[in-house]
Image: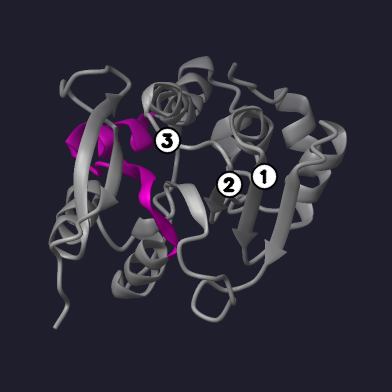
Amino acid sequence: MFVEIEPNFLRTIATDSDRVPTLYYSKYWPVRQVFWMRLKMINFHLQRLQISKDSCLDFGGGGGVFLPTLTRHFQTVFFLDLEDIEARQVAEKHQLNNVKIIKDDVAVVKIPQASFDAIIAADVLEHFQDLSVPASILRSWLKPNGVLLTSLPTENFIYIGLRKVFGITKPADHYHTGSEVESYLKSHGFKQIRRTFVPLYWNIFPLFLVSAWQRDENYSNL
């Protein structure tokens, strides 16, 4: 079951637009629906992938809006972000006793290799100017049969046009398009096993690319 958090609650805990993007509680219904749809599509894949449901990492999970859903899939859900204020409030409101929140930087946090059955990276990788940092670390954290699930903005002409229509400013730290990030992952140790699109399941004017990845065991960075 997917849990869509009530907009007014998100509005009250949002301390800035980075942790809980205003798109989750936008006054425009289509904007809200499309932004939530990214997570709904990841949830769609989680329900169909044949993976263990022991441990999951919500990487760069921002305001923790996906935690109520992830905790229904996995025995333990870890949350990793540079800030944790909003995520802790979400966990408290929804009584998420199987969540472990870590406030730290991916480049320095100490997490053992092969820790997670699934890693969620929903609209976070495009914020890294140097993709080698998260890509290599996330790959090492996946269990051998684990999956990385990504959502990435296309930044295509429709995406740009809708920003203008709804008065949404592109974040200054969107360094890559979704296709650029996916190409990087394919050439740096990941193989794509599922790919869908938002707002439509098929590749028709997509705003977001939603994919599932596994480690490419034939990859060598030597």
Q: Bin the neighbour count of mark 2 within 10 Å (Cα to Cα): few under 14, some 14-19, many 20 and up.
A: many
Q: Residue at x 59, y 28 (%)?
A: 26
Q: Quick check: 111 above or below 143?
A: below
> Alpha-carbon distance for marks 1 and 2?
5 Å
- Residue hosting label 2: 55
The amino acid sitting under disc 3 is Ile
Q: Amino acid at mark 2?
A: Ser
Residue at x 86% of width, y 40% of height: 92
Q: Secondary structure at mark 1?
A: strand
Identify residue for label 3.
51
Is residue 173 something one can see in this rendering?
no
Q: Which residues are magenta?
A: 141-165
Q: CA distance from mark 1 to mark 3?
A: 14 Å
Quarter holding the N terminus? top right
Q: Do labels 1 and 3 touch, CB within 8 Å?
A: no
Q: 71 and 23: which one is in front?
A: 71
Image position of 33 with respect to 76: above or below: above
Rendered image: mark on residue 76: 1
User: Residue 55 versus residue 162: which sits nearer the camera?
Assistant: 55
**CB-based contact (under 8 Å), mark 1 and mark 2:** yes
Secondary structure found at label 2 = strand
17 left or right of 183?
right
**In the image, what residue occupies the spot 49% across and 19% down?**
33
Query: How many residues crowd mark 3 within 10 Å: few (<14), some (14–19), many (20+)?
Result: few
Q: Position of residue 59 (x, y in %)?
A: 52, 55
